[in-house]
Image: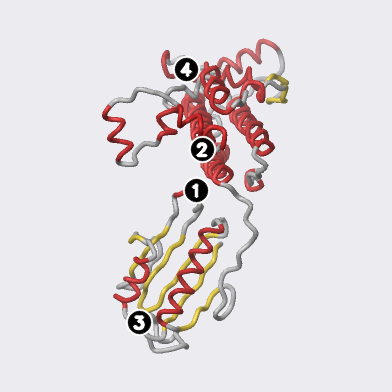
Amino acid sequence: MGRDLTFYPKKATKDELKQFIESLGFTKCDHLWDWPKGTLNYQWFDFEDFKSIDGVSADIYPVNKEDNIFNNNEWAIHVRNLYSASIYDVQMLNNVLREARKLFGGTITGDYGTNRYAPLWEDKSTPISRGIQWVYNKIFYAIEAISKTLPDETIQFQATDGVKMKMLNDYIKQYDPSRVLYNGLVPFLISMFEYFFSETFQILIKYDDTTKENIKQHSQKIDFQTLIEVSKNERTIENIIAGNYIFQNLNQLNKAYKEWLNIDVRKILFRKKKLGKSINYLENRIAEIIQYRHGIIHRFELDLNLSKEDFIVLVETVKLAIDEVINFLENKYAMQIERDCYE
């Protein structure tokens, strides 16, 4: 679902509409929809300070005369974004329609009636909240995808009661090929954990008021190749600083957050949680999963006792760890990260 609006100009050529759209910073793109022949598809996205979530699509297309009851112009502009779009995205969508109407005259139609724009709302977001929201959405989309598509175990053998029969059952299921897949997904799971803490660290040190001064005073040797990457906007100062730490190592991760942000991640995670059928300290379980990942990657140590249920517990453990840190950051920076769609 999203916002769909169309502008029918009184008088405008295809080239005039093209020049107008491009003057607003839109770039050409491909489109999945089957538009009429001759359509020009454009997109706009504001990467600065994580302002855009969905961006805006704008399509200049030839009008079917039967659909255009407003005038005889041969071309129209259709603009759209999703309901998940940020206020900046919706402001740009409205800006396209407003400025086009000023230049060319004409009529707006769509979800909100004739000549009406998409409604705005009170926005309390900050670069920090928008950045972390973006990282959170990306991570938890992947987590939900794993949870919903994880295949069942292939061997459905179930022994009768008894200690020996249970041992037989466990032994047979060690040869289930699905368990190799579950092991293979553990590094992927830890990569999500690493990505979250690395990206969040970079966002915080960029926008946290206390760290801005620390960055100015920071001294670090960098090679010429890194300078070239910075000059081409392929790397940022925050990315270079993050490169000094390993975010799939709890000690290193904690060192980064403590040195730059005075945030003790291990302390945040040092709390008991129900993980599967047992209660453990969240910090300890995360450390174990990280070591499990290292064993798979560096020594190909597969745990063939890892069942689907066991792997889902690992997923929930990583999710809980990220949620605990999000809770802390929400309080520290007086912000809110939307998580309803993942609950």
From the image, tell me which residue sits under label 1: 50
Do residues under tags 1 and 2 come within 8 Å of each other at their CB atoms?
A: yes
Within 10 Å of disc 2 (Cα), the crowding (few <14, some 14-19, many 20+) is: many
Q: Which residue type carries mark 3?
A: Ala
Of the residues tagged 4 and 3, which is closer to the observer? 3
From the image, tell me which residue sits under label 2: 203
**What is the secondary structure assignment of the residue under circle 1?**
helix
Give the image location of residue 240, x and y in percent.
40, 29
Of the residues tagged 1 and 4, which is closer to the observer? 1
Instruction: Kindly report the distance in space between the C-alpha atoms of the residues bearing marks 1 and 4.
Output: 33 Å
**Which residue appears at 43% of the width and 63% of the height?**
57
Colouring of the image: secondary structure
Compared with 290, 37 (above or below) is: below
Instruction: Kindly report the distance in space between the C-alpha atoms of the residues bearing marks 2 and 4.
Output: 27 Å
Q: Which residue type carries mark 2?
A: Ile
Q: Farthest top residue?
A: 164
From the image, tell me which residue sits under label 3: 12
Q: Which residue type carries mark 4?
A: His
Sequence-earlier tag: 1 or 2: 1
Front one among 114 and 186: 114
Give the image location of residue 100, x and y in percent.
43, 76
Do residues under tags 1 and 4 come within 8 Å of each other at their CB atoms?
A: no
Do residues under tags 4 and 3 come within 8 Å of each other at their CB atoms?
A: no
Instruction: Kindly report the distance in space between the C-alpha atoms of the residues bearing marks 3 and 2.
Output: 43 Å
Within 10 Å of disc 4 (Cα), the crowding (few <14, some 14-19, many 20+) is: some
